[in-house]
Image (tube, grey):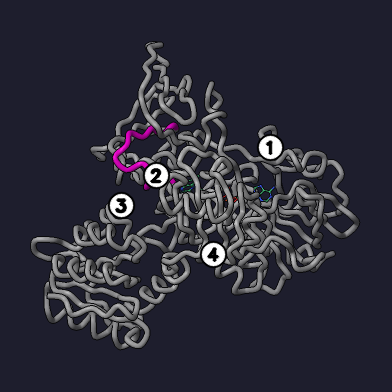
Amino acid sequence: MAEAVDAARTVILTVDDDPAVSRAVARDLRRRYGERYRVVRAESGESALEALRELKLRGSHVAVLLADYRMPRMNGVEFLEQALDLFPGARRVLLTAYADTGAAIDAINVVDLDHYLLKPWAPPEEKLYPVVDDLLESWQVTSGKETPTTKMVGHRWSARSSQIREFLARNQVPYRWYSSDEPEGRRLLHAAGQDGLRLPLVVAPDGTALVEPEERELAGRVGLSTTPAADFYDLVIVGGGPAGLGSAVYGASEGLRTVLVEREATGGQAGQSSRIENYLGFPDGVSGAQLTDRARRQATKFGAELLTARQITALEVRGAARTLRFSDGSEVSAHCVILATGVSYRQLDVPGVTELTGRGVYYGSALTEAPACQGQDVYIVGGANSAGQAAMFLARGAKSVTLVIRGSSPAASMSHYLLQRVMESPVISVRTDTVVEAVHGTDHLEKLTLRNTVSGETETVETQWMFVFIGAAPLTDWLDGTVLRDAHGFVLTGPDLSPDGRPPAGWTLDRPPYHLETSVPGVFAAGDVRAESAKRVASAVGEGAMAVMLVHRYLEQS
Ligand SMILES: Cc1cc2nc3c(=O)[nH]c(=O)nc-3n(C[C@H](O)[C@H](O)[C@H](O)COP(=O)(O)OP(=O)(O)OC[C@H]3O[C@@H](n4cnc5c(N)ncnc54)[C@H](O)[C@@H]3O)c2cc1C
């Protein structure tokens, strides 16, 4: 039996079938968290689930679940899987013996495990508390706010509803979604004097009703900064992906007055990843959302300003100042600039796609749309890691997931570990040598026409969901005439600017450009936007940090 539950405080629940171990974990947890959290202990998966059901009915919050792996009848992974249905936002930890780490690693994908703790966990100050502290902190920031104050009324087949939903989700703004055809959605529309023809309706925490809002207006209403506090900075960073966030953390922590400008949501491509498994220091993997959340908190802690929903459209050199223009014509200037604008999804150029984007055809929105794909047939176009990750993620709930790949094998483009999992999944199938020839539907996606590139045969399949991951391109046209780029639009830096040993055209200094410096002194590039970059989270973060080191060198010498 589990202990009686108390709805007043947020819960940390621990379950272990060995009574001595169970008591010891609960004792250690109470010692540190007992004042702020209710620690509930159970000795079997079944009784822990019973306690969770009771907590759910009483409206309690559960922040962290710690489950022993080896329990009779229901093991820790099976328990966590069922617990997910009741408290999807709770952070999940598996307690394992060294011999079971393989099972723990497999569980990462099954239950989106946040951490596995090797037994024994003593001393808790070193092994248990840092992990739980971290999980509680991230829970507080995201799922902790289980009663979101932003409400959104939209419709599944409204493209603008889907964009705004993605915007809120990627910026980790807690919100509650109501369909315009459900009673509460209709009530909200009525209260705002709307007939539902223009969607979405967003009701901000202060009660303001916004109809089909622009991202910038919405950002301001839900508490995201959109305007720089000053006109002049030491450093402006353009782009809030891993490279930009890395630069912001190092720039601000080293005393530079730093502002980062992001046009959509911080996290960039990495923020859209369901699980990054190759980033140093996260042996259990980390979701893009978690990594972004931590990086953002770290950057703001050091004093960096982060602006969201603001796009930079021009760069000008005005003497020693580097001036960036926003899309609304306003400006911000700095001594130095780091371009960290990454790459954007390439659009699928086949008939019907433009009309149905956001209405069944999505670019990179797999995480936001996944709940709606439960029990459905889903198609993913692309054969690289991003497509593989999306397939694994969607396979948790979809009836079937089909990967449509132009090449003859995904092995050429997908990491070995990921490909193995994709191939082992009973839900995922792979169609090689296949392209999407057309998409069909009136107000939403209904069918796809697929063509086999070897046999030439076509087939029309029924589906309401297609996610496209067909590579990406840098969107750097706005740098035309200022910063030198290669034929594909990637920004040239350092030695790549002088293949013949001569400085680039227009270079005015008597030293060659620094390693990450562009053809404009004091303007640097980091991450995926840089020509010849590695296209990895770790390298983007590393380049972001290194660019700041070069900013210091530039400032010292100018
Ligand atoms: C689904 C997915 C899964 C991935 N998984 C992994 C993985 O497991 N491991 C790994 O190592 N790599 C992975 N990658 C690759 C990795 O995410 C990228 O290499 C990394 O994000 C690059 O970081 P970045 O900061 O250079 O650029 P990006 O992440 O592309 O960020 C650039 C940011 O700049 C913003 N921006 C662009 N132009 C402007 C402008 N004009 N004004 C203001 N803002 C602008 C964009 O909105 C974006 O947020 C994955 C990529 C995807 C898409």
Closer-to-camera residue (152/53) = 152
Specify whether residue 515 is in view.
Answer: no
Q: Is mark 2 within 8 Å of ligand 1?
A: yes
Magenta stretch holds residue 373 = yes
Q: Secondary structure at mark 3?
A: helix
Q: Which residues are magenta?
A: 369-381
Question: How far apart are the alpha carbons under marks 4 and 1?
Answer: 28 Å
Q: Earlier in the sequence, mark 3 or mark 2?
A: 3
Q: Give the residue pinned by disc 3.
A: 109
Give neighbour class at mark 2: few <14, some 14-19, many 20+ (Cα, 10 Å).
Answer: many
Q: Give the residue pinned by disc 2.
A: 389
Label of residue 20 in the image: none
Q: Residue at x 30, y 46 (%)?
A: 396
Q: Give the residue pinned by disc 4.
A: 295
Q: Position of residue 9 (x, y in %)?
A: 34, 80
Question: How far apart are the alpha carbons under marks 2 and 4?
Answer: 22 Å
Depth check, mark 4 against mark 1: the one in front is 4
Q: Position of residue 87 (x, y in %)?
A: 31, 63
The correct choice, above or below, for 241 with respect to 407 in the image is below
Q: Earlier in the sequence, mark 1 or mark 3?
A: 3
Task: Tell me the quarter of the picture where residue 65 sits.
Answer: bottom left
Give neighbour class at mark 1: few <14, some 14-19, many 20+ (Cα, 10 Å).
Answer: some
Q: Give the residue pinned by disc 1.
A: 489
| Amino acid marked by disc 2 | Gln
Q: Secondary structure at mark 2?
A: helix
Magenta stretch holds residue 427 = no
The correct choice, above or below, for 31 with respect to 195 in the image is below
Q: Position of residue 381 (x, y in %)?
A: 44, 31
Horizontal side of residue 290 vs 514, given as left or right: left
